[in-house]
Amino acid sequence: MLNKKIANKNNQSNQLKRVALLLESDMAFDRAIARGVGDYIRSQAGWVILMDPMTKPTMKSLQHWNPDGIITSIHLPAIDEIASLKNIPMVGFGSFSEELDGHLKFPIVTSNQHEIGQMAAQHFINNGIRHFAFCGGDETAPWCRQRREGFIEELKKHNHSCDIFEPSFNSPTNMSDAIHSLSNWLNTLPKPTGVFAFFDGWARWVLDACVLQKIQVPQQISVLGVDNDRWLCELSQPSLCSIDTNARNAGYKAAELMNQIMTAGTPPPALTFISPSNVVERDSSNYMAFDDPEVAFALRYIKEHACDPITTADVLKVTDMSNSTAYRKFMKAIGRSIHNEIQRTQMSRVKELLTTTNLNVSAISLRS
C-alpha cells in the first residue's frame, strides 16, 4: 500500500530512503533538475533514487517502487492522481501558475518567470538593441505570459516598447504553420530588433523563419530563447543564445526540501522561487548594435577578454579613447563606466562557466 503510516517510517529512519524522481526525460528543464538532485544526494548519504528514464512516470510505477518520498514534475499528466496520495512526503518542480497548479498541496520549487523576462530585456539592452519583440502567445502557457510581462516591464524602465507576436494558427505545436506566421511577422519588424522567444523551441522556429526570409542573424534580428537546451541550441543555425533558468539549482533545492521533510518533518514554504542563472552567449545574439563604433569595439573587446584580468587602461589602449571621452561615451551608451562593465561581464562569464562546464569557482578564478 502506498498510503503508509508515518509511524512505520520513523521506525525505519536509519535505513536508506527510497525517493521516487518523476520527470519527463525528454525535457531539458527536467534533465537539469535530475542533475541537481544528483548533486544533492552525492553530498548526502542515505538516499536511493527510483526512476525510469525510458518511460513516462505512472501510478503503476509508484506502486511497484513503494517510495519513502516523491520529487515530481507538476506537469505530468498523472499529477493530480499522484498528488492525492496520503502520508508520502512530496516536493514538486516546474513552471508554477496559480490558475493551473494552485490546487496542489505540497511544496513546489519553481522558476521566477518575471526575472527570466527581465534578464532577456537586460541582455538586449546591454547589446545596444533599441527595438524589441516577444514571441509567444497568451494561449500557450501562463509562464509564457509571466515571462512576457517581465520582459515588457524591464523595457518600460528604459522607455522602450515591445512588438508582440500574435499567432495566426490554432495549434502552437504545428511547426510549418508557426514558421509561416513567424516569417510574415519578422518582415514587419524594424531592424535591428531583439526577439525574445519564451522557450528554445520557439526560438529555433524564429531562426528557421529568418533563414527562409533571408534575414541576417544577429545583425538584423537577434534571437534569445529560454532553457539552454544544449543540443537544440547547438543544432540551430546560427547557434542559439539562451537563458539558463538555473534548473540544476532548483533540483538541488527540491532534494534539500525533501530531506528536510523526511528527517525533521518541518513543513517548507509552499513556493520556492529560483532566479535564472545567466544568459548563455551564442551566435544568435552576438551583436553590438551601438551607433558609436568605438563603444561597440570596446564592448566586444571586454566580452572577448572576460576571462582575462583586464582593466580600464587596457580598454583605453585598444580604442585610443581618452579616459574622459570613454567615460562620457559609455555612460551615454549603456549607463555604466568601463570599470563597471568589465565587472558585470566578468561576473556573467563566471556564471556561464559554472553552468556550462564542470569547473568550480576556484578553477575559474585560476583562469582569470
Image: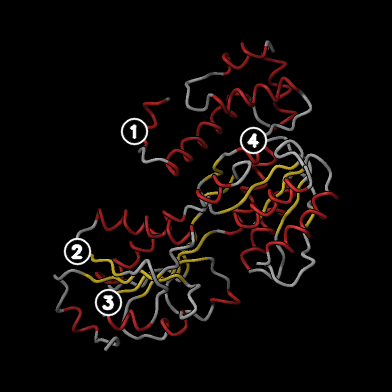
Q: Which of marks 2 and 4 is in front?
A: 4
Which residue carries the number 3 mark? Answer: 67
Callout 4 touching callout 1 (CB < 8 Å): no
Q: Which residue is drawn at 46% across and 81% down?
A: 78
Between residue 113 and residue 336, name the one nearer to us. Answer: 113
Give percent across and percent down for residue 27.
49, 62
**Residue 294 left/right relative to 249:** right
* Residue type at numbered disc 2: Gly
* Residue type at numbered disc 3: Pro
- How far apart marks 3 and 4 lie (CA) works out to 47 Å
40 over 277 or under it: above or below:
below
**Residue 306 left/right relative to 328:** left
* Mark with earlier residue (4, 1): 4
- How far apart marks 3 and 2 lie (CA) works out to 14 Å
Which residue carries the number 2 mark? Answer: 46
Which quarter of the rendered picture does the C terminus lie within?
Answer: top left
Task: Give neighbour class at mark 1: few <14, some 14-19, many 20+ (Cα, 10 Å).
Answer: few
Callout 1 touching callout 3 (CB < 8 Å): no
Q: What element carries label 2?
A: loop
Q: Which of marks 4 and 1 is in front?
A: 4
Which residue carries the number 4 mark? Answer: 286
Which residue carries the number 1 mark? Answer: 362
Give percent across and percent down for residue 354.
42, 41
- How far apart marks 2 and 4 lie (CA) works out to 45 Å
- How far apart marks 1 and 3 lie (CA) works out to 38 Å
Callout 3 touching callout 2 (CB < 8 Å): no
Task: Give neighbour class at mark 3: few <14, some 14-19, many 20+ (Cα, 10 Å).
Answer: many
**Residue 245 left/right relative to 263:** right
